[in-house]
Image (cartoon, rainbow, N blue to C red):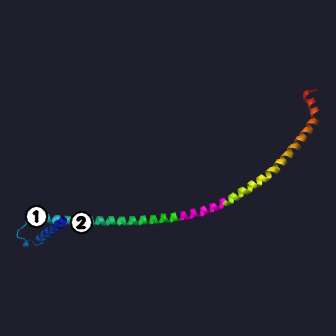
Amino acid sequence: MKQKIAQSLSDFLVFIVKLVYRYPQLSMLKMPDEVYKELTEELKGTKLVIDRKIESAFTSLSETSSLLNELEALLKERTEKLNQLRNEYEKYSELALVEQKKAEAVVLQIRDSLNQGRNIERWVGFAINIFAGIILFVLGIWLGPPLTEIILGR
């Protein structure tokens, strides 16, 4: 309430000063030229300050607007990239599940094949070792005496 009264009083005084400045004949008191000059300079200065502030505010709003547009474009771009990544993730996770099932089936098949072949390989290995042992035994009996004579010189 006090601010409204102070503002009204201030506006009224500014109006009176402007009126006296423009129409000095209305005034009962004659103002010296120095006061007119000071008031004129002050009013012009106030107008220039206000113009500068308005210009500064306009520039600032323009920059803010362009910055917001850039941020909006950047946000849209990142949102699109995020959606693409999300879609790729879903696709690869489904593919991974399918591949995991296939890999489990292949591993089970290989394990079964190895288990079946293991017994056969054991018997084949046993037979080869027995056959090689018999051959070495026969060669030892047959070549033992001549080699003994050659090595020991008897």
Query: Magenta part mainly helix, strand or loop?
Result: helix
Relative to residue 67, is residue 111 drawn left or right? right
Helix or strand or loop: what does disc 1 sit on?
helix
Amino acid bearing label 1 = Val
Local crowd size for mark 2, using a 10 Å CA cut-off: few (<14), some (14–19), many (≥20): few
Q: Residue at x 66, y 60 (%)?
A: 99
Q: Is residue 37 above or below residue 148?
A: below
Location of the N terminus by quadrant is: bottom left
Relative to residue 101, is residue 36 drawn left or right? left
Q: Is residue 146 magenta?
A: no
Amino acid bearing label 2 = Ile
Mark 1 and mark 2: Cα distance apart in space: 22 Å
Helix or strand or loop: what does disc 2 sit on?
helix
Nearest the eye: 18 or 81: 81
Nearest the eye: 13 or 39: 13
Question: Toward which corner of the image does residue 64 lie, by quadrant?
Answer: bottom left
Image coordinates of residue 45 in percent, x first then y, are: 20, 64
Image coordinates of residue 89 in percent, x first then y, are: 57, 62
Kindly identify which residue carries mark 2. 50
Q: Residue at x 37, y 66 (%)?
A: 65
Of mark 1 and mark 2, the one earlier in the sequence is 1
What's the mark number on residue 107? none
Number of residue marks: 2
Q: Residue at x 59, y 64 (%)?
A: 91
Q: Residue at x 14, y 65 (%)?
A: 39
Image coordinates of residue 15 in percent, x first then y, are: 14, 70
Q: Which residues are magenta?
A: 84-100
Kindly identify which residue carries mark 1. 35
Relative to residue 67, is residue 97 drawn left or right? right
